[in-house]
């Protein structure tokens, strides 16, 4: 039996390239080179049948450590809370006011990119503080 060590996170969305580029900014990811034989992703996109154009986009961790992110266009919009979400680890090892300051600083960086601040969850007996956000298509994610 083999052990899976790599995985891809797939987002259903309305605008794959726009959402992928947002997450590139959030995570420091990059858009990989277009497929062989194409100078740009636009060239590749134009080569597809009309119904497949703009239907997907990819970004990846330039270090190769983090998972590849794939964004696929779907016809339906988001209607309920995510069952799964990403936690962007900006406060690891920090506690109290120092942690809150790191969360707030990252929130301030992401809001101009189109993210929305949703709510701050303050530390309790079990968990440290985290800040719930939404990406440009309303998908929840946490700054923790």
Image: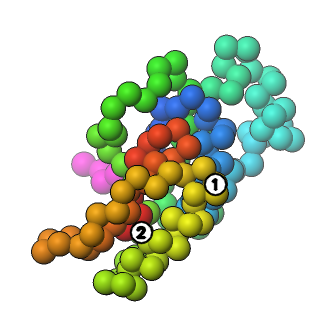
Expressed as whole percent of the image width and height from the top left, the position of residue 73 reads 56, 27
Q: For the point 76% across and 28% down, which residue is it? A: 45
Q: Is residue 71 left or right of residue 143?
A: right
Q: For the point 52% across and 73% down, which residue is it? A: 105
Q: Is residue 110 left or right of residue 21?
A: left
Find disc 2 in the rendering and name its residue. 89
Q: Which class describes the residues within 10 Å of circle 2: few (<14), some (14-19), or many (20+)? A: few
Expressed as whole percent of the image width and height from the top left, the position of residue 123 reads 23, 73
In terms of sequence position, does the residue under pointer 2 or pointer 1 come before the other? 2
Q: Which residues are magenta?
A: 1-5
Q: Is residue 10 left or right of residue 28?
A: left
Q: Are marks 2 and 1 in contact (CB under 8 Å)?
A: no
Report the coloring of the rendering: rainbow
Question: Is 62 above or below relative to 72?
Answer: below
Question: Is 80 above or below relative to 94?
Answer: above
Find disc 1 in the rendering and name its residue. 113
Expressed as whole percent of the image width and height from the top left, the position of residue 20 reads 61, 45
């Amino acid at each position: 039996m083999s052990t899976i060590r790599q995985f891809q996170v797939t987002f259903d969305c309305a605008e794959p390239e726009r959402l992928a580029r947002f997450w590139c900014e959030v995570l420091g990811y990059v858009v990989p080179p277009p497929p062989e034989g194409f100078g740009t992703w636009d060239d590749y996109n134009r080569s597809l049948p009309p119904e497949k154009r703009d239907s997907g986009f990819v970004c990846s961790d330039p270090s190769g450590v983090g998972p590849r992110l794939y964004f696929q266009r779907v016809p339906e919009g988001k209607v309920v809370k995510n069952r799964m979400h990403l936690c962007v680890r900006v406060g690891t090892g920090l506690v109290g006011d120092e942690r809150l300051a790191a969360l707030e600083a990252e929130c301030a960086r992401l809001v101009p990119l189109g993210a929305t601040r949703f709510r701050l969850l303050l530390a309790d007996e079990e968990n440290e503080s985290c800040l719930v956000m939404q990406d440009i298509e309303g998908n929840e994610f946490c700054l923790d």
